[in-house]
Amino acid sequence: SQQGEEDPQALSIQEGENATMNCSYKTSINNLQWYRQNSGRGLVHLILIRSNEREKHSGRLRVTLDTSKKSSSLLITASRAADTASYFCATDDRDDKIIFGKGTRLHILP
Amino acid sequence: DGGITQSPKYLFRKEGQNVTLSCEQNLNHDAMYWYRQDPGQGLRLIYYSQIVNDFQKGDIAEGYSVSREKKESFPLTVTSAQKNPTAFYLCASIITGKGNQPQHFGDGTRLSIL
């Protein structure tokens, strides 16, 4: 029961540039979360945005949520080599489980 | 430091063998989850438990079993009935069984077939 779908599937940018990833989902949500996964590791929670919020910031991260379009975006500003990872959006379902998308693989080029 | 510990990091299974993956947390979280991740894919939910001595099937429970005898522990057994067990297995926990809290993850167990 896939809910969120990230776009693009893969993204390569030069160090210092901004990276934008998008997430679309199908049904109404209470909140949406973004996670990062470094290769061979577990997921790390980045940010949670509630359905009544439109934008949220955390350091170099900016997340927006448009519930009318059922979409969210994650912007990483001034990218660094350490930002190379996969990024997943996750939404809650009516059974209070969290459903993950397939992720965007971000590669920061030196 | 509080966290989730998964062991072993790598595991090999012979045909017809059951193997058990360990997941222990010292975060005092109520709910625990097991996910399977295949290459280039997202996470698929295998089983979850919102309270001790209770657990529910996720989307791909066939060929797997779990127990939740203690709050800290949620082991996953991959049985011989699971015909394609090669994957990366992730355990997660959450303070309550609600979907509005961030999940904390272990560093995974990579299971391969010999």
Image: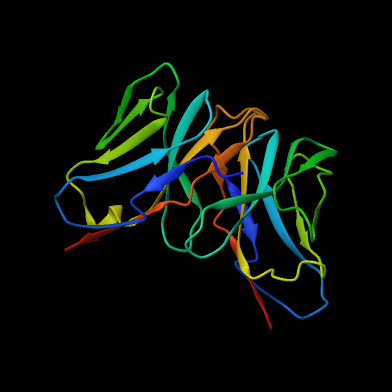
Give the residue at the far top of this rendering.
Answer: A52
Residue A39 is left or right of residue B67, and the answer is left
Q: Quadrant of the N terminus of chain B?
A: top right
Picture quadrant of residue B81? bottom right
Give the residue at the far bottom of this rendering.
Answer: B114
**Residue sitting nearer the eye, B13 or A68:** A68
- Residue B5 at what x, y percent from top left? 62, 53
- Image height check: is B76 above or below A33? below
**Residue sitting nearer the eye, B32 or A25:** A25
- Residue A4 at what x, y percent from top left? 48, 41
Residue A53 is left or right of residue A3, and the answer is left
Residue located 54% across and 56% down the image = B107
Residue located 57% across and 40% down the image = A99
The colour scheme used here is rainbow
- Residue B48 at what x, y percent from top left? 72, 42
Picture quadrant of residue B20? bottom right
Residue located 37% across and 33% down the image = A72
Picture quadrant of residue A57? top left
- Image height check: is A109 above or below B60? below
**Residue sitting nearer the eye, A8 or A58:** A8
Q: Quadrant of the C terminus of chain B?
A: bottom right
- Residue B60 at what x, y percent from top left? 71, 53
- Image height check: is B58 above or below B65? above
| Number of numbered discs | 0
